[in-house]
Structures are given as C-alpha cells and as structure tokens.
C-alpha cells in the first residue's frame, strides 16, 4: 500500500519536485552556456561596430604627405599647421628651439668666416679677425642637440662684431657660391634681441667672480628669459630625420600631415608613408635655381627637385592621388632675381629674368612638362612658408582642392 502511495505522489507532484539532483546541475550548466553564448554575441557585435567605425574613420581621414628635396620648407610648413590650428609648443619644445637657434647662429657664422677666407675677402679690422678665430674655435659637442645658453653667451659679442664686418657682409652677398642656411640672416639681424638678455651676463661678470654662485644664479636667470617667438621658431632649422606626423581637425574632418626628411639619405623612408595617402604636397625652393645640393656639389637644387617630382608624379601608385605643387620661398625669389640671372643655369628660359611673373611661369611650365599625363591641370601655389597669413590662405584653397578631388563620395558637411 505504501508503495502505491509513493508512486501516486510522484505522479501528482510537479515535475520540478520530482527532478533528480543531477538534473538540477544540468539545467544550471545549460543556463551558463546560454549566458556565455549571449555574451560572445554581444562582444562580437561590439567588435564589428568598432571595426566599422574605424573603416569609416580611415575613409574619412585626409592623409597629406609632404615631399620635396632637403631645405624646401616642409618642416616649416608643418610648424605653420600647428600654429594655424592653435596647437602651441610646450615649454620643453620652446627650450629645444632656443638651443637650436643658438646652434644655427654659430654654425652660420662659422660658414661665413670660412667662406670669407676661401673667397679671399679681407677683414675690415684686425680685431674682427680675432673674433673670427674665436667663432671658428667653436665646434659643438659631439652628440649634443643644440647649444646651451651658457655656451652661447661666450660668443655673443664676437657674433655681433662679425656681422657688422664688411668682409662678412661681402661673403654673405656671395652666399650662392657656398652652402649657407637662409635663416642665418634673420637670426643675425635679430641678434640684439636674441643676445641682449644673454649680454646682461657680461654685466653680471663685472660684478661677481665668474665661478661664484651669485654669478651662476644671475646668468641662469638671464638665459632663461629668452623664449623664441613664433617667427623665431619658423626660422629655426634642424634637418628632419625619420618621419614626423601632425594630426588636426578642420570642420570635424581629421587630417594627418606627414613630413619626411628630404635629403637623399632620408628618401628611402618615403615608401613607409605611401599607404592610404589622400594627397601629396610637393614643395620646391623656387629661389635655389643657382645653387647646388649640400650632399652633391655637382647637382643643381632646382634640377634635383624636378627629377624627384618627375618620379613621384608619374608613379602608378599615385594615379588617384592629388599632387599639388608648392613653389616655396617666394620672398627669397623676389630678392634673387634682382641680382642673379636665371639664364645662367637655365638657358632655355624665355622672358624677362628680372620679372617675377616670367620666372614663376617658367618654373610652373618646367615642372608641368615632367608629367606624362597632362590631361589634368597641375595644381600649384606660390608660397612663403615663414609667412603665417600666406600659408593660412594657401592651405584654405589646398584643403578645398583635396576634398573635392579625393572625397566626393563622403558626406563631409
């Protein structure tokens, strides 16, 4: 009887009450598996959404590559992009620029003193000859980046006297016959401002023993006072080694600008930057038609730029890439055509060698002829990279050209 009761009770009780303990474990396992599967699907959807966002961002990204021979103004243009887009340089960067500027000045004067000697130009005075020997004794520290203020202050008086010397000025007038950075004149013309605070150290030296703590503290205060201006930064010269990138937004559109060293030894790195580029800004120093390369004294700088441009513009990799020519350093070209006839180096020139428009038209035609496919117009601009307003205006036009040519299929507004 009891067995029958037990059997009936099992039949009448709910299924959950009669399930074996093992069945309960099985249910929990199934629930855990289902939860894991739901989590895996959720993560998969998140990853798919992230990849889709990245693909849209890549398609939307405007990647601009700055190409051109060394000293064509690429790094200066990149600095301008930072300034124009409101990205100021931090304190460390400013101090680095300061030390670079000191080095630019000393190296530039060494070149001028050496050139004066090789060109057989006389000193204005014996005293300046001694100052020249002092500057030539500076060699810079091996592996050092820039010149520290305490070192630079030793040469300020000599630099000022030398820049006023008629022999140095005559050598400078013949600068196309040797290698001299274009920024040297700017810095030496501003030596009173750049060196004035340092010169206060000379007053400190008269009041305190050179090795005293008071002198060191006073001169350090003087040195720290000089902070390069924006214009100083634009004129500071340091060869680009490697790849330098700058990211910014214009109307919510992401831009990436890439600067690669232009010297021959750096050009193998260009190929690392070709992936996904939207446009190439090819920069040329338009004033260097009478100068030779620093790394090859037999090759004309403008001819070198034309040869590089020919290689780039006819490369199949860039069939769908807009290439815009920047004929840079217009300010220096204006000065150059007054004294140097372009026909000496380019006898095929037809026109008035003293007329800026004729020279610029010749340069545009010379580069345009390097293109095999001349069906499309050659977008070009005449620029002065150290002029912020000029670059602001030009880049506004360039931006529109780039977006119209390369991003027609993307909703940008």
Image (cartoon, rainbow, N blue to C red):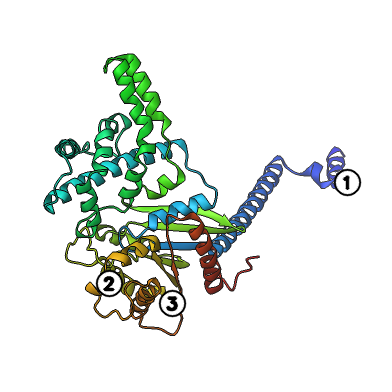
Q: Residues within 10 Å of mark 2 (few under 14, many from 20)?
A: many
The vertical placement of 356 against 161, above or below, is below
Residue behind mark 2: 342
Which structural element holds mark 2?
helix
Residue at 39% x, 63% y is 330
Q: Residues within 10 Å of mark 3 (few under 14, many from 20)?
A: some
Residue at 31% x, 62% y is 69
Locate residue 320, reporting x and y percent: 46, 75
Residue at 69% x, 44% y is 28
Q: Nearer the viewer, mark 2 or mark 3?
A: 2
In this view, the residue farthest toward the bottom is 375
Is residue 397 visible to the viewer in this orientation of the structure? yes
Residue behind mark 3: 378
* Picture quarter with the C terminus: bottom right
Is residue 315 visible to the viewer in this orientation of the structure? no
Locate residue 101, reporting x and y percent: 34, 42
Locate residue 231, reporting x and y percent: 44, 47
Residue at 22% x, 47% y is 166
Q: Earlier in the sequence, mark 2 or mark 3?
A: 2
**Location of residue 372 (image quadrant):** bottom left
Locate residue 169, reporting x and y percent: 24, 50
Q: Earlier in the sequence, mark 1 or mark 2?
A: 1
Q: Nearer the viewer, mark 3 or mark 1?
A: 3
Q: Do residues under tags 1 and 2 come within 8 Å of each other at their CB atoms?
A: no
Left or right: where does residue 85 sit relative to residue 211? right
Left or right: where does residue 376 sit relative to residue 334? right
Residue behind mark 1: 12
């Amino acid at each position: 009887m009891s067995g029958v009761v037990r059997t009936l009770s099992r039949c009448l009780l709910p299924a959950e009450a009669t399930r074996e303990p093992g069945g309960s474990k099985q249910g929990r396992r199934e629930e855990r598996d289902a939860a894991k599967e739901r989590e895996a699907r959720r993560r998969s959807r998140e990853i798919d959404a992230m990849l889709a966002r990245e693909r849209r961002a890549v398609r939307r990204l405007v990647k601009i590559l700055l190409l051109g021979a060394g000293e064509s103004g690429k790094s200066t243009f990149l600095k301008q992009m930072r300034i124009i887009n409101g990205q100021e340089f931090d304190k460390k960067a400013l101090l680095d620029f300061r030390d670079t500027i000191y080095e630019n000045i000393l190296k530039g004067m060494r070149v001028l003193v050496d050139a004066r000697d090789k060109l057989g130009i006389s000193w204005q005075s014996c005293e300046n000859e001694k100052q020249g020997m002092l500057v030539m004794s500076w060699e810079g520290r091996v592996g050092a980046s820039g010149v520290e203020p305490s070192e630079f202050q030793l040469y300020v008086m000599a630099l000022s006297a030398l820049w006023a010397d008629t022999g140095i000025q005559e050598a400078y007038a013949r600068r196309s016959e040797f290698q001299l950075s274009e920024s040297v004149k700017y810095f030496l013309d501003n030596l009173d401002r750049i060196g004035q605070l340092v010169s206060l150290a000379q007053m400190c030296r008269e009041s305190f023993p050179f090795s005293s703590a008071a002198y060191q503290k006073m001169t350090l205060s003087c040195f720290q006072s000089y902070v390069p201006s924006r214009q100083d930064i634009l004129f500071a010269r340091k060869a680009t080694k490697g790849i330098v990138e700058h990211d910014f937004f214009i109307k919510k559109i992401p831009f990436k600008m890439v600067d690669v060293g232009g010297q021959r030894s750096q050009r193998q790195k260009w190929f690392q930057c070709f992936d996904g580029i939207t446009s190439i800004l090819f920069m040329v120093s338009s004033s260097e038609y009478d100068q030779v390369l620093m790394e090859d004294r037999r090759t004309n700088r403008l001819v070198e730029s034309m040869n590089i441009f020919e290689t780039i513009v006819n490369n199949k990799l860039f069939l769908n890439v807009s290439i815009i020519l920047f004929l840079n350093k217009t300010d220096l070209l204006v000065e150059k055509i007054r004294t140097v006839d372009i026909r000496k180096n380019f006898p095929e020139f037809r026109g008035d060698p003293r007329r800026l428009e004729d020279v610029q038209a010749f340069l545009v035609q010379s580069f345009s002829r390097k293109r095999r496919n001349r069906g499309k117009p050659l977008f070009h601009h005449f620029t002065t990279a150290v002029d912020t307003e000029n670059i602001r205006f030009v880049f506004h036009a360039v931006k529109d050209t780039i977006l119209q040519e390369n991003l027609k299929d993307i909703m940008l507004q």
